Image: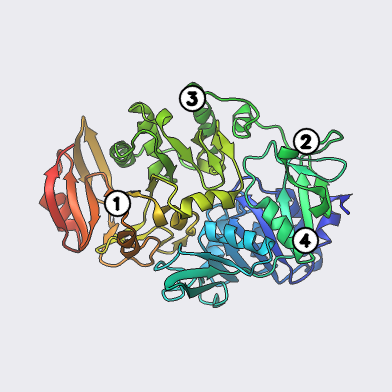
Amino acid sequence: MFKIMTKEDAIELINDGDVIALNSFLGIDNPIELHEALYERYKRTGSPKKLTMISSAGFGAWDEDRAAEGYIREGAVDRIICGHFGAMYSTKKLVLEDKFEAYNLPLGCISHAIRAQAGGIPGALSKVGLDIFCDPRKEGPGINNISNDTSLVEKVEIDGEDFLFYKLPKMNVAIIKGTAADKKGNISFEDMYTAGDALSICQAVKANGGKVIVQVDRLVVKPSRPHNTIIPGCLVDAIVEIKPEPRHAAYESLTGSFEIPYSQWQDWSEMLEKRTKTKNVVNTSAEIIGKRAAMELTEGDIVNIGVGIPETVSKYARENGMLDKITLTVEAGGVGGFPASGKVFGAVIGADSIYNMANQFDLYNNGGLDICFMGGIEVDRHGNVNAHRGPGAFAGIGGFANITAKTSTVVFCLTFNTKGLNVEDNDGSILIKNEGHIPKFVDEVKSISFSAKRAKENGQRVIYVTERCVFELVDNGLKLVEVYPGIDVERDIFSRLPFDVEVDELIEI
C-alpha cells in the first residue's frame, strides 16, 4: 500500500547495495529533488552506498551540480549501466577516470531487458549490437579499465543465427517522475514529455520485492482517465509531492496538452531553442550537409533524425516542402510532430502519439524506419562508424545502434574533418578556407558504433554526406559518388583520405 511521504522519508527506503532503476530520458522527466535528497542523506550519513544505477537513456540535468551528479561524484555509486551519459556532465568524465564501474549498452536493448525482467524473463535477445563495440567478441560493454562484468551481454546462437542476450541485475528500487497521483495512488503522466520505461521498471521492481518511489507535481482527488494512468497504484510504495516551478508555455507545447498544427511547429520550436539550446553557433558546414541530406527524403517516409549536424535536415525538409509529408519519430516514444532538441531532446512538439519506449524500439529494431540521419565522430575505410567515443571524451551509444541496425537507408551527416574547419558557401559553390586538424575519415575507427559488414549483409543503403562530397558504402568500402561545386577532388578529398576509395561518375549538385 502506498504512502504519501516527504522526499527525505522516501529516500530512507533505499538501502546500501540497492539496484536503482530510473526512467529519465537524458535531461527530461527527471525527479531531480529525489536525487538531491539522496545526496543530502549520503553526505549526512554515508548511506546509501554501493549503489547500482540502471537507466536506458541517462538521468542527468545538463548541470554537474544537480540531480544525481553529487552523490555519484562523492562515491555512493559503484556501478552505472546506461545507454547515454551526455546530460551527466561530471559523471561522464569520472567514467574515464575509473572512479566506478560503467557500462554502455544500446538504449533500446536496455529498454527491452527491463521489459523482459518485468515479465520474469532473464534478459532480452537482439541482433542489435552484433559486430559493434558492445559485442563481447569485440570490446564488450565496459567503458573503463575496471568494468569487467561479462554477464551483461552474451553472444548466443538460436536456429543457426547469432544474437546478443542482454541481461540486467535484478532491480529493487524504482525512482520515477510522474505528473499526478490520485487517492488510490494511480500515477498519470499528462504533463510529462515521455512515458519511457516507467511501467516496466515498476513491474520489474515489484516482482523483485523492491520499492517504487514516485515524485509527482500534484495530488488530485479526481482520478485521471484510465488510459492516462501509466502506473497503477498497486505498484507504488511512496509518493512524494514536489510542486514544480512555473515554466514557459514553450515547454507546455511538449506535453501534448493542446493541439499544435503544422503551421505553428516552427514558432514553438524557435521559442524552445531560446531556452534549451546548448550551443548557439551558425555552422556553415552543417547547413551544407543538412541541405544535401534532406534531398534523400521521400513522401511517406518514417524517419529518425539524430542530434547535432543531422538536426539541420529538418530545416531543409521544411524548406523543400517535405516536412509535413513524412513522419518523424524520436527514441523516447514520440511519433509524428517535430522532435525538440537541446536540453529537451526526447520530447516532441505536436506529436501524434507518445507510447512506451520499448515499443518504439520494437519499431526500430525490426526495420520500421525508412530512413535515418545520424552523426559520426569517425568513418573508416570499411565504412564502419564511431559515434559514441571521441578522443578523451565519452557520451555513449544511446539509440544510435538500434536506429541504424536495420533501417533501409542510413544517412551519416558529418564534416570531413574538425577543430578548425572553416567553410564558405558562395551560392552553392563550396570553398574550404581552412581545414580542421582532426580528420574524421580514418584507416580504422577507435570503436565501432555502426558495422558496415552487417549493413551490407542486411542490404541497407548507406551514404556519408559531408560539406564537400558524398560517399556511398559498397562491397569494398567507400565509393565517392558526388563532389560539390567549387571542390577540387585531388586537393580537398583524395589528398586528405588515408585510404583509397572507388570513384563513381561524379555528380555536382
- The three-letter code of the residue at mark 2 reads Ser
User: Residue 499, can we see it?
Assistant: yes
Residue to which mark 3 is pinned: 262
Residue to which mark 4 is pinned: 206
What is the secondary structure assignment of the residue under circle 3?
helix
Q: Residue at x 53, y 27 (%)?
A: 268
- The three-letter code of the residue at mark 1 reads Arg
Q: Is 56 placed left or right of 468 in the picture?
A: right
Q: Earlier in the sequence, mark 2 or mark 1?
A: 2
Label 3, label 2: how far apart the Cα atoms are: 28 Å
Residues 421 and 457: in front is: 457
What is the secondary structure assignment of the residue under circle 2?
loop
What is the secondary structure assignment of the residue under circle 1?
strand
Q: Earlier in the sequence, mark 2 or mark 4?
A: 4
Residue 192 x %, y %: 66, 40
- The three-letter code of the residue at mark 3 reads Tyr
Q: Is 49 placed left or right of 471 in the picture?
A: right
- The three-letter code of the residue at mark 4 reads Lys
Residue 496's place in the image compared with 270, above or below, is below
What is the secondary structure assignment of the residue under circle 4?
helix
User: Residue 43, can we see it?
Assistant: no
For marks 4 and 3, give the one nearer the viewer: 4
Residue to which mark 1 is pinned: 461
Q: Residue at x 70, y 65 (%)?
A: 171
Residue 291 x %, y %: 30, 36
Label 1, label 3: how far apart the Cα atoms are: 30 Å
Residue to which mark 2 is pinned: 224
Label 4, label 1: how far apart the Cα atoms are: 44 Å
